């Protein structure tokens, strides 16, 4: 039975979502604010986190930042009335996996939970040592990109995207695959978010002309090293 950590400060909505998830076969741990949610997470990591963004004591974004310092893989779904592109991108930067705008249907939430749980990869050995990308050295576990003694700290989402580009270097990384693995689906809105992250990665590697991230029109991207 999958365990959902639900953090929602609107008590009425929180209880409705909790009851609906339990009826559908989930075990639910419920918290009414971010600090309580973090304590429950630390007591025993759930299979997935569903968290409101606007909460007292510790908001959803701050909560996600704390979770990602302890666990890089547990899926996180944000629930929020905020839908500006900057807010959504920020949520993904912090390691969120999906973003559901209020008001939402329970069926949609259930579908997204199942989709994220089904995509959880089997544990793989961590890379040994920094990965060479031209003159750069990419420390994937630490999410750092280093050049000539200087390093840039990558967000969780930037590091995951760069790792996928590295694994497929000099080959095409399909856009649809990245969107489904990192964003949950290949919707137009998520596609715009992916474009923002690709632009940021290009800025990170601009100091080595031997490294390029090409846009393969209609297909995806290619890291040329």
Image (cartoon, rainbow, N blue to C red):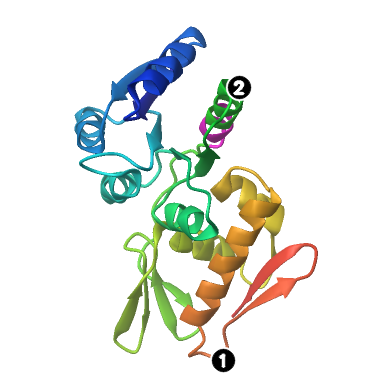
Q: Give the range drawn in magenta.
A: 114-119
Residue toward you, 138 or 54: 54
Q: Where is residue 180 in the image (x, y as percent from the top left)?
A: 63, 46
Q: Main secondary structure of the magenta part?
A: helix
The correct choice, above or below, for 95 with respect to 10 in the image is below
Residue at point 19% right, 32% down?
A: 39
Does the rendering let one see residue 138? Answer: yes
Q: Which of marks 1 and 2 is in front?
A: 2
Query: What is the secondary structure assignment of the residue under circle 1?
Result: loop
Numbered disc 2: secondary structure: helix
> In the rendered structure, which disc, 1 or 2, sits on the residue that comes first in sequence?
2
Q: Quadrant of the C terminus?
A: bottom right
Lateral position of residue 110 relative to residue 60, left or right? right
With 86 as the anchor, is 180 left or right in this view? right
Residue at image x 42%, y 22%?
13
Q: Is 192 situated above or below 69?
A: below
Q: Does the magenta stretch include residue 200?
A: no
- Label 2, on which residue? 107
Q: Examine the rendered structure and indicate whether residue 159 appears above or below residue 216.
A: above
Q: Which mark is residue 122?
A: none
């Amino acid at each position: 039975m999958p365990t959902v950590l639900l953090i929602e400060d609107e008590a009425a909505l929180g209880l409705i979502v909790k009851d609906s998830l339990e009826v559908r076969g989930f075990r639910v741990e419920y918290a009414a604010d971010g600090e309580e949610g973090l304590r429950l997470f630390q007591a025993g990591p759930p299979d997935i986190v569903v968290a409101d963004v606007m909460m007292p004591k510790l908001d959803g974004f701050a909560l996600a930042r704390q979770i990602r310092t302890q666990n890089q893989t547990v899926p996180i779904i944000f629930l929020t009335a905020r839908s500006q592109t900057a807010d959504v991108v920020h949520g993904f930067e912090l390691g969120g996996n999906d973003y559901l705008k209020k008001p939402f249907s329970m069926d949609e939430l259930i579908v997204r939970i199942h989709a994220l749980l089904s995509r959880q990869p089997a544990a793989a050995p961590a890379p040994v040592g920094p990965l060479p990308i031209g003159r750069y050295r990419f420390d994937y576990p630490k999410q750092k990109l280093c050049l000539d003694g200087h390093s840039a700290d990558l967000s969780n989402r930037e590091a995951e995207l760069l790792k996928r580009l590295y694994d497929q270097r000099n080959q095409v990384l399909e856009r649809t695959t990245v969107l489904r693995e990192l964003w949950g689906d290949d919707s137009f809105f998520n596609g715009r978010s992916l474009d923002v992250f690709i632009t940021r990665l290009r800025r990170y590697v601009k100091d080595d002309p031997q490294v390029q991230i090409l846009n393969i029109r209609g297909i995806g991207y290619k890291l040329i090293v």
